Image (cartoon, helix red, strand yellow):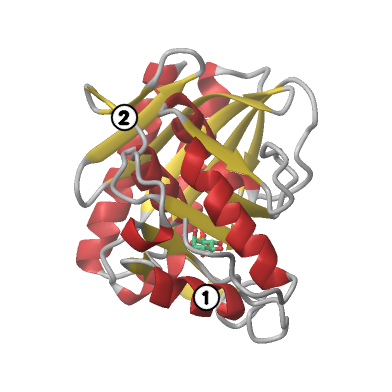
Amino acid sequence: MLDIAIDLARQAGELLRLGHQNGAGLIRSKSSAVDLVTQFDLASEQLISDGLRQHFPDHAIYGEETGGTLPAAGPVWVVDPLDGTTNFAHGYPVFSVTLALLVDGRPELGVTYDPLRDDLFWAQRGQGAWRGQRRLQVSTTTGLDASLLATGFAYDRASNADNNLAEFSHFAPRTRGVRRGGSAALDMAWVAAGWLDGYWERGIHVWDLAAGVLLMREAGGVVTNYSGRPWQPADRNVVAANSVFHAVLLESLQRVRQGLPAPAPH
Ligand code: IPD
């Protein structure tokens, strides 16, 4: 199953790489004016879904562009055929293909492919997290002042006051930096790789995160929602980091969201 998932992610990634070179093609908006879909999101999802259906006719598929309801039980492939659509639509070279197999809601295998760097991140439950042949390990950073973080801003940010700006304003001056890369799947993979120390975001979906959750867990990291409960597919917010730093990040995040003063530096 892993080989097939990797093969499909690579094929879809090649499609996106060519699209990136030649232009994103037709673009339209979805849930809000800034939530875009390109013809490459659709073509990539078609390619992956066709391949999954051919190899695993009994498995369900839950793709970003096809939608529907995520089945709670049984094997389900969760697919984001182009994570980083806004970047892709503008030619900004940061996007990925990400897919994961959930069984009864638990990630069993996950693949995130960055076609422009030919970087393949993969994980299987109990088998570690890998970038190609190299095993991944989260960073050992424990304090905000030595950390590099990533986040994102949901597509409802113009209409929802809970738009992550307070959180961003809190962390930006207290860390080495906060990146807004534009592909949550890469943010998660890069925390798993130890290149980033933590990631948080609200308004996020299972298809953006499922593979990253497994990469994180297998790389020794912790992934929860904003309440601190271990991540579940229905969660729409997420905090990911190594286990020590996760507590620091979560506490800060919760205090900011409650309007409380920041805790003393750790
Ligand atoms: C988006 C990206 C982005 C995150 C958004 C996601 P999409 O996914 O992962 O980084 O901030 O919340 O929706 O729409 O490009 O597949």
Marks 2 and 1: CB-CB under 8 Å? Answer: no
Q: Position of residue 135 (x, y in %)?
A: 28, 23
- The numbered disc on residue 39 is none
Outermost residue to the front: 264
* Figure check: 67 above or below 120: below
Residue positioned 75% across, 45% down in the render? 234
Q: Would you identify the image quadrant in which residue 215 lies?
A: top left
**Residue 176 image-quadrant placement:** bottom left
Q: Nearer the viewer, residue 39 or 218?
A: 218
Query: For the point 63% across and 80% down, which residue is it?
Result: 157
Identify which residue is drawn at 51% across, 80% down.
169
Residue 40 quadrant:
bottom left
In the rendered structure, which amino acid carries the disc numbered 2?
Answer: Leu
**Total residue callouts:** 2
Whether residue 123 appears in this view of the structure is: yes
In front: mark 2 or mark 1?
A: 1
Res. 203 in view = no
- As drawn, is 165 to the left or to the right of 68? left
Regarding mark 1 in the picture, which secondary structure is present there? Answer: helix
- Residue 159 or residue 179, whichever sits in front: 179
| Label of residue 136 in the image | 2
Residue furthest to the bottom: 158
Disc on res. 170: 1
